[in-house]
Amino acid sequence: MNVRYRVRHEIERGKVLRYVVQLEVEEAGSWHPVRRSDSAHGQAHWHVFHRHKKADRTALGMDFNDALTQAEEAVKNHWEEFVKQWPTE
């Protein structure tokens, strides 16, 4: 199984204006999201994706700078755990 994470962000004068950090797995030739933290809808939040049901969404209650840092650290440090959980969710 191949795993990757993607990061996009826009920063102006040291302030994160928008961001997305997404962990993905490749299965049967297609990439599938496992976890994503983003600033869509003006709020930092995590999505936990499942194979057969709607993703869970949890607000983070922090500014985008801190949320981006937290998301990158979480994916870098816990990606194996997130990927192992994905098939069972």
Image: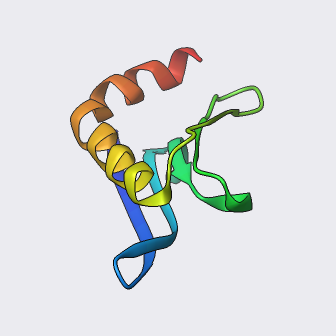
Residue 55, given in percent of the width and then of the height, sits at 70, 34
Residue 53, given in percent of the width and then of the height, sits at 76, 26
Residue most extreme to the left: 77
Q: Is residue 28 visible?
A: no
Q: Quadrant of the N terminus?
A: top left
* Rendering quarter of residue 57: top right
Q: What count of labels does the image hold?
A: 0
Residue 20, compared with residue 56, is above or below; it is below
At 40% from the left and 60% from the top, the residue drawn is: 65
Taking depth in this image into account, of 69 and 82 the one nearest to the observer is: 69
Q: Quadrant of the C terminus?
A: top right
Residue 78, compared with residue 66, is above or below; it is above
The figure's colour scheme reads rainbow
Taking depth in this image into account, of 17 and 53 the one nearest to the observer is: 17
Residue most extreme to the top: 88
At 40% from the left and 28% from the top, the residue drawn is: 82
At 65% from the left and 29% from the top, the residue drawn is: 51
At 35% from the left and 44% from the top, the residue drawn is: 70
Residue 21, given in percent of the width and then of the height, sits at 44, 55
Q: Is residue 38 visible?
A: yes
Residue 18, compared with residue 3, is above or below; it is below
Q: Is residue 2 left or right of residue 29?
A: left
Q: Is residue 76 left or right of residue 61?
A: left
* Rendering quarter of residue 41: bottom right
